[in-house]
Amino acid sequence: MAIIKGLYTDETGATGIEYGFLASLIAVAMVSGFEALGNEIDNTFGYVEEEYSAVN
């Protein structure tokens, strides 16, 4: 019974799991931010291309 109680209260791997969880959340935030930024850049270049085509 003492072995089971010792395993239940053992939290040595908790910090590794927490760091992994934080890293995954940061990665998801970065991917969504890069996607939004990419869409804005694509829209900007599309606008510049349309204006350039209208002049020439």
Image (cartoon, grey):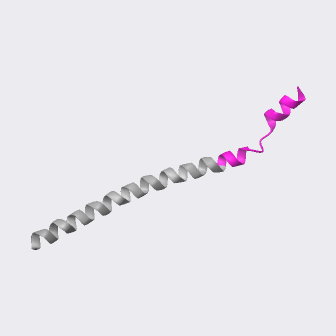
The answer to if 4 sits in the magenta stretch is: yes
Q: Work out which quarter of the rendered image holds the C terminus and state it.
A: bottom left
To which quarter of the image does residue 33 belong? bottom left
Q: Percent x, y for residue 22?
A: 60, 50
Q: Residue at x 84, y 29 (%)?
A: 4
To which quarter of the image does residue 51 belong? bottom left
Q: Residue at x 84, y 30 (%)?
A: 5
Write down the region rendered in magenta. Answer: 1-18
Left or right: 18 as drawn, with respect to 36: right
Main SS of the magenta part reads helix
Q: Residue at x 63, y 49 (%)?
A: 20
Task: Name above or below for residue 35 compared with residue 55.
Answer: above
Q: Percent x, y for residue 36?
A: 37, 55
Q: Work out which quarter of the rendered image holds the N terminus and state it.
A: top right
Task: Name above or below for residue 18 compared with residue 48.
Answer: above
Residue at the far right: name it.
Answer: 2
